[in-house]
Amino acid sequence: MTFFFTRALDSFLGRGDSAITVPALDGVLRPNRRLDDAPERIPVAAPSGIVASHDGLVAGSGNELLLLAAGDRSRILHRAGAAISCLAPAAGGIAMGLEDGRIVIAGGEFDGVVFPAVDGARCPTALTEEDGALYVCHGSAQNLPTAWQRDLMERNASGSVWRLDLRSGRHHRIAGGLAYPAGIALSDDGLIVSESWRHRIILLDRDSGAVRRQLQGDLPGYPGHIGGRPGGYVMTMFAPRNQLVEFILRENAYRRRMMAEIEPAYWVAPTWRSGRSFYEPLQGGGVKHLGILKPWAPTLSFGMVVLLDGQGLPCDSFQSRADGATHGITGAVVIGNSLYAASRGDDVVVRLDLDS
């Protein structure tokens, strides 16, 4: 009874889950253009993620696994049976989550291993492997990975984390009821998972799936990929939060009618890349002046990579602002003194020198 009373009071006062406030970009997350100023930009069509392998830097693009090289010299390592939604190193090979829900291993000790899609696990969004155990995030039980906007607008919380045994083929669900888990990394005391629709990073128990603690909350964007790096982690935010979107998420009648009557490309919703059509929302004077997009304008897309320390606290950030050209970051990896980030919104993988 107390819970329902509190929810009703929050809705009336516009606080708690009913608040539409969005935290400001401040401190180490203060706005910058470091992704756009990257000295190297490798063209890749709609990269779904990047990983470091023994062959070099590998990216997913459509149904192709590419070994990246400067200019147009990237080459195809593997063609999957469906579009690649996520990827991770796995025992000398590459584990890939596919758009049709399957998990496939290419190369290495477990080359050719395939896990078919099962009910409730058809939306692979993130992978990580350790000692023959593959941990997989499925963002939604209702929608495929490409329908992530719909999943947000439907306000779903049906995501899950699974453990797959690459040797025996057994699979086990560790956790459920998550609001679109889109990134996963291993730590000494559990699994670090990004819960996108709740704008937070949590630590899960590897066995029970219980939330042990929240590492980060009320983030200014939707957290995605998380990977390890020396001394900490690297995290991406694939889209920004926006007060107008937060408001629409709480206006059920308007939101349902928008989804029923308007093409998804023109929803008031976050996206990989905005600003390419005059049919899109947010085209008023608060966004453009004399036909020029303001860098500080409210936007439905941006680019952001955040370096986290060993405790999950942000210590540096790399961004592409509203008027930038490196939006929709789907993956990032640190190799030596270089940071690589995959921009799905602008079809490019960028390299930055961390020393600078």
Image: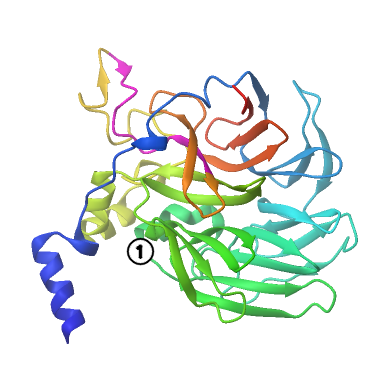
- Quarter of the image where one finds residue 230: top right
Q: Determine if the magenta segment contains residue 50.
A: no
How is this picture coloured?
Answer: rainbow
* Above or below, comparing residue 138 to residue 23 in the picture: below
Q: Along the horizontal axis of the image, is 276 left or right of 61? A: left
Q: Nearer the viewer, residue 348 or 51?
A: 51
Residue for point 27% across, 21% down: 288
* Above or below, comparing residue 21 to residue 14 in the picture: above
Q: Which residues are magenta?
A: 291-307
Q: Position of residue 334 (x, y in %)?
A: 67, 39
Q: Along the horizontal axis of the image, is 280 left or right of 182? A: left
Q: Along the horizontal axis of the image, is 109 left or right of 96? A: right
Q: Along the horizontal axis of the image, is 84 left or right of 233? A: right
Q: Outermost residue, bottom direction? A: 1
Q: Position of residue 326 (x, y in %)?
A: 52, 29
Residue underneath mark 1: 155
Is the N terminus in the top left, top right, bottom left or bottom right quadrant? Answer: bottom left
Q: Is residue 45 visible?
A: no
Q: Determine if the magenta segment contains residue 297.
A: yes
Q: Which amino acid does the dot numbered 1 rest on? A: Arg
* Above or below, comparing residue 263 to residue 9 in the picture: above
Q: Position of residue 344 (x, y in %)?
A: 57, 38
Is the C terminus in the top left, top right, bottom left or bottom right quadrant? Answer: top right
Residue for point 29% across, 28% down: 297
